[in-house]
C-alpha cells in the first residue's frame, strides 16, 4: 500500500531552455556551436543565421546584457548540458554526514564508545558531525563544551576539520572528515 500520493511528492524542477522565436530580447550576443563569439545582432538576424545553418537558436544567459544565445542543434545542446552536469557530480564525494550526539557531562566510557563509533563512520568514508547540546545552566560553560569537542577531534585521530567548532543556538557543532 502506498502511503504518499504522487501529487504530494516534491519533484526537481526541469530546466527550461528558451529557443528560436520564443526568445523575447530584441538584441542578442550570439555564439556559434563551438562557443566562439559571432557578435551582437538583432533577434531576426540571429534567427536567419540559425535557419541558414539548419540549427536552433538557444538562449543561454537570459539575464546578461545583452542576453547570450547560441546557434546550435537543440538536442546536441541538451546532451552537452547533461554531460556538464555529470562531470560536476563526479567531483562531489558520495559520503554521508553521520551525527554523534554528545552531552557536556558525558562519562569517559560513553565518550570512548562514541569516539569508536565516529572512527568507524570515518573508515566507511563518511563525514562525522559532532553535536554537543547545552541545556539550562550549561550555556554558561561554552568554553568547557568547546574543549570537549576539541578533545573528541583529537581522539578521532588524523582527520580534516570540515567545519570548525561553532556555537549554533544551544548546540556546539563541528564536522570532521577523513584525511585523504
Image (cartoon, grey):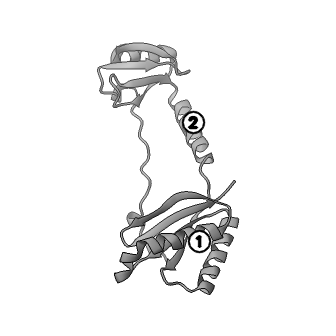
What is the x, y in percent for residue 102? 51, 78
Label 2 Cα neighbours within 10 Å, binned few <14 / some 14-19 / many ≥20:
few
What is the x, y in percent for residue 73? 52, 26
Q: Is residue 100 left or right of residue 61?
A: right
Between the residue at mark 2 and the residue at mark 1, the CA separation in whole angstroms equals: 47 Å
What is the x, y in percent for residue 118? 63, 72
Could you tell me if residue 121 is visible in this image?
no
Element under label 1? helix
**Total marks drawn?**
2
Q: Is residue 152 left or right of residue 47?
A: right
Q: Nearer the viewer, residue 133 or 73?
A: 133
Q: Nearer the viewer, residue 66 or 56?
A: 66
On residue 79, the disc is 2
User: Which residue is located at x 51 percent, y 77 percent?
Assistant: 101
Label 1 Cα neighbours within 10 Å, binned few <14 / some 14-19 / many ≥20:
some
User: Which residue is located at x 47 percent, y 73 percent?
Assistant: 145
Compared with 119, 37 (above or below) is above
Q: Nearer the viewer, mark 2 or mark 1?
A: 1
Amino acid at each position: 500500500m502506498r502511503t504518499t500520493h504522487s501529487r504530494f511528492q516534491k519533484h526537481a524542477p526541469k530546466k527550461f531552455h528558451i529557443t528560436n522565436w520564443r526568445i523575447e530580447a530584441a538584441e542578442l550576443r550570439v555564439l556559434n556551436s563551438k562557443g566562439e563569439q559571432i557578435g551582437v545582432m538583432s533577434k531576426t538576424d540571429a534567427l536567419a543565421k540559425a535557419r541558414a545553418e539548419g540549427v536552433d537558436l538557444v538562449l543561454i544567459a537570459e539575464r546578461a546584457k545583452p542576453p547570450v544565445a547560441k546557434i546550435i542543434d537543440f538536442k546536441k545542446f541538451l546532451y552537452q548540458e547533461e554531460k556538464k552536469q555529470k562531470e560536476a557530480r563526479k567531483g562531489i564525494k558520495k559520503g554521508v554526514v553521520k551525527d554523534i550526539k554528545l552531552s557536556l557531562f558525558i562519562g569517559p566510557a560513553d565518550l570512548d564508545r562514541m569516539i569508536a563509533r565516529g572512527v568507524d563512520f570515518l573508515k566507511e568514508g563518511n563525514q562525522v558531525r559532532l553535536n554537543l547540546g547545552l541545556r539550562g545552566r550549561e550555556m554558561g560553560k561554552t568554553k568547557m563544551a568547546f574543549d570537549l569537542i576539541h578533545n573528541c577531534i583529537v581522539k578521532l585521530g588524523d582527520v580534516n576539520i570540515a567545519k570548525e567548532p561553532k556555537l549554533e543556538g544551544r548546540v556546539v557543532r563541528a564536522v570532521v572528515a577523513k584525511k585523504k
